Image: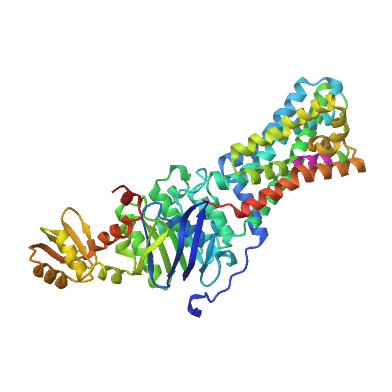
C-alpha cells in the first residue's frame, strides 16, 4: 500500500506538487495520469525519498520509504529506464541490484528470463539497448527483490505493442497476487486498459480520483446539437454542468435520458446522443486537465 | 491502518560491508573504471622503464623510481574516487542507487572506503613495480641497487596518496559533476600550490603563514620522509580547512539534493 497525505513540493515560487493525497491499494493497479509536467514524476520521487517533500508525508506499507531496512525487497522502483551507466551490461546492472539486496545470484538469470532478455542481449552494454530493452531491464531490476509494491514511471514508453501487452499481463498478475501497483502515464489509453483506480493530476494538483468505473460513470453523456450554447444554458438551468467538445459536441454531466428531455423541452434537434463511454474518459481527461495543462493555456 | 498491508517478513538492514563491496564492484565494472585502475599498473611500468632508460647511473635509486611513479598515480587515484561519486549524478545511476540504499550518507561512506581501498592496494603494487625496476635498472647499468627508502617513508607516501584520493572524493561530493570536480582537482593540485609558492616568495607575511594554511605545502612533509610534531599539527590544521570543512558542506548538500 502507498499512502500520500497532503504532499507538497515547491521550487522557489513554483509549486510542482500541490497538496496531493491518495492511496494505492494492495491487489489493485492504480494509474497515475496527467499531462507532461503535471507533477507525476516529482510525486513518485517524493514517495521513494529521492526528492524531499516541502510539506506532507508519503508512506509505503505504513512506513516512510527511508525507514525500510532493505527497500528493494519491499518496493520495486522504475523511475527512468534510461538512467543507467551506458558502459555497463544489462546483466551487470541487475547484478548490482542483486548484490545490494543480498539476493542469490540465480535471481539475475530468473529475471532476465522473465523479461525476455536473451543471454546475448544481457551481455551487451546498455548504450546499445533500445528504449524498449531498457524498460524490460528496468522492470527486471524492479522485480528482482520479489517486492509487494511496484512504483513505475511511464513504464510503457518505448515498448512495442506486444511488449505493452506483455507488461500489462505482468502487472495484472502482480496485482492479482495481492501486490500494489502505481504506474504513471501521460497517455490515457495506456492506463485505461490496465488500471483499476485512477488518480488524475494537472499542474501539481489532483483533479480527479476514484475507481475507473466511477470515473467512467461520471463522464455523463455526449450530445451533438444544432445550437449547443442554448442547450448548455438549458442544462445549466437544471443544475447540470457541461463543456464543449469538438466543433459541435457537448459533454454533459447527466445521463442520456436527462439530456434528451432537456433538449426536447428546449426545442433543439439532437443530432447524436450517447453515454460517454470509453472515449468519454478521454473527454474527461482532456476536460479535467484543459484548465491547467499547457495545451489548455494555449487554446 | 490495516495489518494486512504490513509485510509479515521483517528484513534486515543492508550491512555496510555489502554496500562497500558492491560500490567496489561498481568502480571496476565499466570500461572507463577498469582501465583507470589498470592504467595505474601500466603507467607504473612505463614510468619505471623511462627511469631505467634515461636516468643517470648515480640517480638510479629506489627513491627515484617511487618519486617518478608517484606523479601519474597522484593523478589517477583521485580520478577513480571522483568518477565513483559524480557518476551517480552524471550517469543518473543515483536514481537506482539511492532508491536501493536511501541513506545517502552510507553510500558516500561506502564509496570513500572503496576508493581508499583501491589506493591502499594499488600504491604498494606500483611501488613493487618500482622495486623490480630498481633491481633490473641497476643490473643493466652494472651498479649496486640502492634502497634509500625506509618502511616509514613508504607508509608516509601511501598516506600522502590517500589524502589525494580524499581530496578528489571531497571535490566530487561538493561539486557532483565529473568535469567540474576534475577541473577543480587540477586547480587544487597544481594551481593553488603555484600561487602559494609565488606568494610565499614575494610576501613575507605569507611566508610565515604558509605552513598553517597551505595544504599542499603541509603534505610535502610526507614526501620528505620525516615529519615533526609541528608538521603533523600543520597537516591537521590545513586538512581541516581544505578537506574536512568542504567535505562536511558537500555531505550536507548530497543528503538534501534532489536525485533526478
Q: Nearer the viewer, residue A289 or B197?
A: A289
Q: Residue furthest bottom?
A: B3
How far across and how far down the image is residue B59, in percent? 84, 23
In this view, A154 is above or below A1 = above
How far across and how far down the image is residue A182, in percent? 42, 64
Residue A247 in the figure: left or right of residue A130: left
Q: Is residue B80 visible?
A: yes
Q: Which residues are magenta?
A: B156-163
Q: Is residue A117 visible?
A: no
Q: Residue furthest right?
A: B229
In this view, B173 is above or below B57 = below
Q: Nearer the viewer, residue B212 or A86?
A: B212
| Residue A24 part of the magenta segment | no
In this view, A31 is above or below B227 = below
| Image point (73%, 26%), residue name | B49
| Residue B159 part of the magenta segment | yes
Amino acid at each position: 500500500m502507498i499512502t500520500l497525505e497532503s504532499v507538497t513540493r515547491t521550487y522557489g515560487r513554483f509549486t510542482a506538487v500541490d497538496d496531493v493525497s491518495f492511496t494505492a491499494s494492495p491487489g489493485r493497479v492504480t494509474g497515475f495520469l496527467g499531462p507532461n509536467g503535471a507533477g507525476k514524476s516529482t510525486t513518485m520521487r517524493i514517495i521513494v525519498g529521492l526528492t524531499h517533500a516541502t510539506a506532507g508525508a508519503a508512506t509505503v506499507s505504513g512506513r516512510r520509504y527511508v525507514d525500510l531496512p532493505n527497500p528493494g525487497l519491499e518496493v520495486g522502483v522504475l523511475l527512468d529506464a534510461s538512467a543507467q551507466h551506458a558502459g555497463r551490461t544489462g546483466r551487470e546492472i541487475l547484478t548490482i541490484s542483486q548484490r545490494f539486496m543480498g539476493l542469490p545470484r540465480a535471481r539475475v538469470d530468473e529475471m532476465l528470463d522473465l523479461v525476455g532478455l536473451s543471454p546475448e542481449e544481457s551481455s551487451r552494454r546498455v548504450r546499445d539497448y533500445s528504449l524498449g530493452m531498457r524498460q524490460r531491464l528496468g522492470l527486471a531490476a524492479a522485480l528482482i527483490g520479489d517486492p509487494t509494491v511496484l512504483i513505475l514511471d511511464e513504464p510503457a514508453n518505448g515498448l512495442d505493442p506486444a511488449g505493452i501487452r506483455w507488461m500489462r499481463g505482468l502487472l495484472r498478475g502482480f496485482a492479482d497476487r495481492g501486490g500494489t501497483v502505481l504506474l504513471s502515464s501521460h497517455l490515457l489509453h495506456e492506463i485505461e486498459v490496465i488500471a483499476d483506480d485512477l488518480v488524475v493530476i494537472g499542474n501539481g494538483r489532483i483533479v480527479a480520483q476514484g475507481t475507473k468505473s466511477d470515473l467512467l460513470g461520471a463522464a455523463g453523456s455526449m450530445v451533438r446539437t444544432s445550437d449547443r450554447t442554448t442547450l448548455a444554458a438549458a442544462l445549466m438551468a437544471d443544475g447540470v454542468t457541461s463543456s464543449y467538445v469538438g466543433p459541435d459536441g457537448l459533454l454533459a454531466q447527466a445521463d442520456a435520458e436527462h439530456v434528451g428531455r432537456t433538449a426536447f423541452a428546449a426545442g433543439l434537434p439532437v443530432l447524436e446522443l450517447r453515454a460517454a463511454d470509453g472515449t468519454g474518459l478521454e473527454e474527461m481527461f482532456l476536460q479535467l486537465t484543459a484548465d491547467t495543462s499547457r495545451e489548455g493555456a494555449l487554446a | 491502518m490495516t495489518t494486512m498491508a504490513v509485510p509479515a517478513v521483517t528484513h534486515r538492514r543492508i550491512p555496510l560491508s555489502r554496500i562497500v563491496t558492491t560500490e567496489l564492484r561498481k568502480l571496476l565494472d565499466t570500461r572507463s573504471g577498469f582501465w583507470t585502475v589498470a592504467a595505474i599498473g601500466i603507467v607504473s611500468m612505463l614510468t619505471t622503464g623511462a627511469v631505467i632508460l634515461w636516468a643517470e647511473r648515480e640517480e638510479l635509486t629506489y627513491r627515484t623510481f617511487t618519486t617518478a611513479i608517484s606523479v601519474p598515480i597522484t593523478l589517477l587515484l583521485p580520478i577513480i574516487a571522483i568518477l565513483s561519486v559524480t557518476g551517480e549524478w552524471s550517469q543518473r545511476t543515483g536514481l537506482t542507487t539511492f532508491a536501493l540504499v536511501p541513506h545517502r550518507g552510507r553510500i558516500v561512506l561506502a564509496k570513500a572506503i572503496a576508493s581508499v581501498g583501491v589506493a591502499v592496494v594499488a600504491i604498494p603494487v606500483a611501488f613493487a613495480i618500482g622495486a623490480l625496476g630498481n633491481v633490473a635498472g641497476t643490473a643493466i647499468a652494472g651498479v649496486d641497487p640502492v634502497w634509500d627508502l625506509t618502511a616509514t617513508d613508504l607508509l608516509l607516501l601511501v598516506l600522502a596518496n590517500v589524502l589525494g584520493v580524499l581530496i578528489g572524493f571531497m571535490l566530487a561530493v561538493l561539486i557532483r559533476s565529473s568535469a567540474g570536480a576534475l577541473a577543480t582537482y587540477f586547480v587544487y593540485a597544481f594551481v593553488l600550490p603555484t600561487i602559494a609558492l609565488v606568494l610565499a616568495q614575494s610576501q613575507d607575511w605569507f611566508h610565515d603563514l604558509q605552513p598553517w594554511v597551505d595544504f599542499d605545502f603541509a603534505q610535502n612533509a610526507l614526501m620528505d620522509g620525516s615529519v615533526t610534531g609541528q608538521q603533523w599539527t600543520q597537516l591537521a590544521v590545513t586538512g581541516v580547512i581544505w578537506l574536512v570543512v568542504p567535505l562536511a558542506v558537500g555531505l550536507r548538500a548530497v543528503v538534501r539534493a534532489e536525485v533526478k
